[in-house]
Amino acid sequence: MNPKFIDLFSCGGGMSAGFTKQGFCTIGAVDLEVAKPSHGIGATFCNDTYERNLGLRPMSADLAVTSPDEVASHFGFGHDDVDVLISCAPCTGFSQKQSRNHVQDDGRNRLVERTVVFAAAWRPKYVVIENVKELLRGRHKHHFQGLHRGLTDLGYEVFAEIHDLKDFGLPQSRIRSLIIAKLGGTFHLELPKVNSFRTVRDAIGHLPEIRAGETDPNDPMHTCPRLLGHSLARMQAIPKDGGSWTDLSEEQAHLRIPSMNIEKPGSFPDVYGRLAWDRPAPTITRECSHPGNGRYSHPEQDRLLTVREMALLQGFPEDYYFEGSLSFKYRQIGDAVPPMIASMIASAISEDMAGRSAAPSQLRMAI
């Protein structure tokens, strides 16, 4: 019988897609689908994306107050049915890129420790968590420490490391905390490292050329927003294959926006930047739907990367379909756990279940 998992904070299904690829069966998923408070519940359409690709409709619920019994009742499973609990709480409150996080502890950060409540109720064999590196080493790492204490008290041994996921073949530099807890035993996560990094060209170089605002007739996800006026002129002026706004000449100074402060070129070096063909992409974030939010522009074509291109750089399958508005398609991708990495984690757990786990990591983080 295939091992079963529950995916809390399931987003568009990145983690679930990786686990199902390795033969795990999803018996439940939960996501409130919130973005900005003004958008309201359900705005991100990520549950529609999850259902379309994985065949199960996630429960729309606030996991800060929803109980394990409510989730189990909604999906009709028993407390002994869960082999793996996936719980990737929002990372926004931990990220160092959010200036307010240097002084404030976002209330959503407590959702990390909420995982213990579900682990206590269902007693899964494994608990899997992915988050930004600051969860383990940042200002608010006490939330991880609370998680660690809670899981340890339940009989889990907790394994935690920080990795750049490009080391494992993701065509993107993405530094993340990977946490696996095993009930009543030791687990060491060993993901296979690549000899050479996968590049932007490797991931998206085969896709057909399109213009800003167009959609590939053979792939509705190979689409991107329009660019007009100064935005288009600015994009056209950025040098191909890794160029930046810092490359603009004085004659092109009228194309700069306020964040392009030539006196402080290190402040926002990547806005309107182009990706380089033969390097991994920089980290794709939830704000990747606009070229002014980072280095998200095509290496050669005068446009933002398409939804499909972003998804491939995030390790999604070629045929994954995203629901919702164009901006929320991009957000679902930026918020996701890369499915190819999730698949590797699932494979490692499957091996451990079968008693074929690898030797302990030499880089294991001390807790």
Image: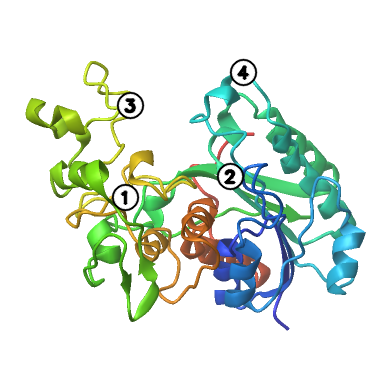
In this picture, residue 168 sits left or right of residue 334: left
Q: Amino acid at mark 1?
A: Ala
Tell me, yes or no, whether the two marked residues, 4 and 2, touch with CB atoms within 8 Å: no
Tell me, yes or no, whether the two marked residues, 4 and 3, touch with CB atoms within 8 Å: no
Q: Give the distance between the C-alpha atoms of the residues marked 4 and 1, in whole angstroms.
A: 30 Å
Label 2, secondary structure: give it.
strand
View extreme (front): residue: 229
Label 1, secondary structure: give it.
loop
Q: Which mark is residue 259?
A: 3
What residue is pinned by disc 4? 103
Sooner in the amino-acid sequence: mark 4 or mark 2 = 4
Label 3, secondary structure: give it.
loop
What residue is pinned by disc 1? 281
The front one of 291 and 175 is 291
Q: Tell me what residue is drawn at x 33 percent, y 45 percent.
A: 291
Q: Amino acid at mark 4?
A: Val
Q: Residues within 10 Å of mark 1 (few under 14, many from 20)?
A: many
x then y, percent, for residue 211: 24, 63
x then y, percent, for residue 348: 57, 64
What residue is pinned by disc 2? 131
